[in-house]
Image: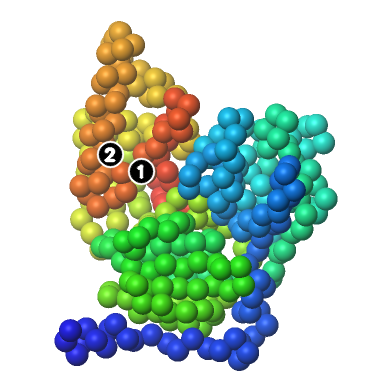
Amino acid sequence: MSAREEARATKRSEVVPRGERSAHTSGGTMRALVRLRLEDGECVELGYGALVGRSSVATLRLDDPRVSEAHALVSVRRGELVLCSLRRMLGVRGRPVQDVVLKPGMVIELAPGLFVEVVDVMRPERVLAMEVEGLGRWVLPEAASLHVGPPPMAVPRFEPDAALHVWWNGDAWRARARGRDVGEVGAGDVVSLDTVDVRFVEVDLPSSATTPSQGPLEAPLRIVAWYDGVEIHREGREPVTFGGVTARILSELVVLAGPVEWHVVAKEVWRESIDVLELRHRWDVSLGRLRARLRDAGLRSDRVRADGGGRVFFVRHAHDRVEDRT
């Protein structure tokens, strides 16, 4: 290892001992969470951005056929912790609701006959976030992985090949950089990786938060949709262009801005009369080509997702911008 590489590997701020930090940066005061009691009496804690569902990547995994893979999400709205339905309506006092502000003592019906009780809600004024050049500021989920790229990207889960892992261990935030244990981290700490510095900062609990479970953190995109052509612009990089059928599919998805039945989009793209089996074949082939084109351009192919129920959507993050010129 060269002297420069060694300097890069060791360059980071010393972690300030807990006793020398402000009260805001110690322990659970840096994490907003809700404590739920399940039907079997078990209590679980979920921070905002936590996913509830049947999926193996869900923070609260419920192995139950009544629960969708991605069923509900803990979010923040107007400074309150909220449980938001992603697939089916929730139930509170016998009434169906799309989302509900979490309050101690509340009983929520996640699915028909499946209940959880809100035991406690902790909503600090300040929470911990990390700042990365090119990505901006991201309030930490319960576990996060940062890839330095290019392009850099952070995701709300553990990925073994990531350059940096950050997680909540029940008492404090900890970090590990490429197998090197950084230890406990808090506001003011900096971890230097190969090409970027990661800073940990205190931020006000936002009135609305970009929840990591809605997708990974990537550099902002400017998407210009012309229908027969699509341009995706990223700062400091050449635009990526799409044409033909893949552009038409992408245009429909980014303009609709939400889940839509696959055949609705397919019938707009192929307007001639086609047998449903042939239509589905064309759709699957073209969607595969679109995802491959995204991947080859250095974008995440899972920006285009299916929900398992026949609907498909393009994942738009809060910092993305779409120009509809269709």
- Quadrant hosting residue 120: bottom right
Residue type pointed to by label 1? Asp
Residue type pointed to by label 2? Arg
Vertical placement of residue 229 versus 24, above or below: above
- Residue 233, position in %: x, y? 29, 52
In the picture, measured across the screen, residue 263 lies left or right of residue 299, that is right
Vertical placement of residue 88 versus 275, above or below: below
For disc 2, the neighbor class at 10 Å (few under 14, some 14 to 19, many from 20) is some
Q: Can residue 256 be seen in this view?
A: no
Query: Which residue is depicted at the point 31% across and 61% down?
Result: 161
Question: Toward the viewer: 94 or 241?
Answer: 94
What residue sits right under mark 1 in the picture? 302
- Quadrant hosting residue 250: top left
- Residue 178, position in %: x, y? 33, 71
In the picture, measured across the screen, residue 16 lies left or right of residue 105, that is left
- Residue 61, position in %: x, y? 56, 45
Q: Can residue 315 be seen in this view?
A: yes
- Residue 206, position in %: x, y? 62, 63
Distance, label 1 to label 2, CA atoms, is 7 Å
Asked if marks 1 and 2 touch (Cβ < 8 Å), the reply is yes
For residue 259, which numbered disc appears in the image? none
Q: In which quarter of the image is the N terminus?
A: bottom left
Query: Which residue is depicted at the point 67% across and 54% down?
Result: 44
In the picture, measured across the screen, residue 78 lies left or right of residue 119, that is left
- Quadrant hosting residue 13: bottom left
What residue sits right under mark 2 in the picture? 291
Q: Quadrant of the C terminus?
A: top left
The mark nearer the N terminus, 1 or 2, is 2
Query: Which residue is depicted at the point 56% across and 54% down?
Result: 49
